[in-house]
Amino acid sequence: MPRSTRRWPNVNLRPDAGPARRGTRSAALLTVLAVVTCAALAACSPPGRPGPRDPAYAELGRKALRTLEHGYYDGDGEWNVCVPHICGTGNVDWGVDSLTYALYFHWSLTHDRGVTPIMSALLGTAVDYSPAVHTSSDVPVWDTIADVREYQVTRDVVALAKAEAVGRQGFARYWLLAAASAAASDLTAGGTYGRFFGGPPPRAPVTAWQVSGGLTLALAAAALDPRGRSADPGFWRHATFVRHDLRLSGRPVQFTFTGRAVAVIGTIGEVCCQPGHAQVFIDGTQTYDQTGIWQNKSSSGRSLPDSVLFAWRWTTPGRHTIQIRPGVPNAKEGGPFFHMTGYEVVR
């Protein structure tokens, strides 16, 4: 299928609000919660006051859609696995499937007719599962959900269920706008988003596994508050890169700095592409979910230098220590591994 050449209107992304669509749109916005939680959350700033220079959410939403359809979609029924286009293409497993979900989410808000030919092409390359078929997808239900989304668009089926209770809608609205505000800080000039909402814009190629949460949040914010603006999209412009080569070799390693934000930089998939992880302690306390850094896992199958391995913010500047401890060996993540080349700090 040729690449879309449709024009980009200067309007918000929402359809006209009719009684039947309001419930559908509200339920659609709630479903994005499941998508964006796949990405790490470094910080969630509250929605900011409109300012004259930074782009409004409506513009960020249009840019997210352009990135999705012209950066990640390959124009021929598959998704580019990363941008720049060095990781190949595919249409199987949750990373690229999440981009299908994001495109469907946009369609459910707008009923954008330009989405239909893309979904038709994706459906044409979707895996036809049978007992003899084996794919790289760890749970084939990811592909099943993508198939259902493609069917809903191409057959014009009603998108989502009835609206949630008013109270939950209010919470979802606040959460989505706060997360979209944080995500704006890691938006690159090319329109891609990093893994850490509230972290710095990534310098490394951005994979489908990393970008889907930020793109979907931008689409959600454009529908919820098209004139709203993120609180501090230029936060990391004030960062300084400190070259600091630190490698885990059995014992904990650490570095200390003074500032109000830090981002640890290294290579995702340095020893590609699975075993090797570490625990992270901030000023002596382990991160709440104990996820740590699974550095050698690279879903794209490539080593990605200059990636953000971890990011964190504080409300005020201070002296802080980030300590890295060996990860507990397990069958999925393997043994301990950590290697950083430096860190970005906002004083």
Image (cartoon, rainbow, N blue to C red):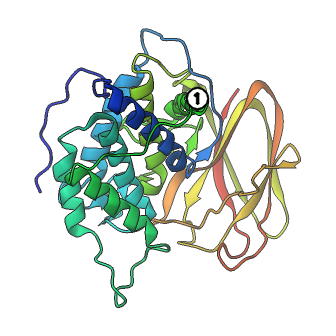
Identify the residue shown where x is 28% and y is 34%: 110
Toward which corner of the image does residue 283 lie, by quadrant? top right
Quadrant in the rendering for residue 68: top left
Q: At which x and y percent is residue 147?
A: 32, 63
Q: Is residue 210 above or below residue 124?
A: above
Give residue 181's position: percent from left, percent from top. Answer: 54, 28
Q: Judge left or right: residue 243 versus residue 59.
A: right
Label 1 residue SS: helix
- Residue 202 visible in image: no
* Residue nearest the observer in this picture, 307 or 154: 154
If the image is split into quadrants, where does the C terminus sit? top right
Residue 212 at x, y = what percent? Answer: 44, 48
Query: 334 above or below 111?
Result: below
Point out the residue furthest to the right here. Answer: 284
Residue 226 location (% of width, % of height): 39, 21
* For residue 293, above or below residue 163: below
Q: Residue at x 38, y 56 (%)?
A: 82
Is the residue 220 above or below the residue 338 in the image? above
Badge 1 crowding class, 10 Å Cα cut-off, few under 14, some 14 to 19, many 20 or more, is many
Q: Is there any visible trace of residue 322 in the rendered image?
A: yes
- Left or right of 239 on screen, residue 139: left
Residue sitting at x 56%, y 33%: 165
Q: Is residue 257 left or right of residue 221?
A: right
Q: Amino acid at mark 1?
A: Ala
**Most extreme residue toward the bottom, as rendered?**
132
Which residue corresponds to mark 1? 178
Residue toward you, 150 or 317: 150
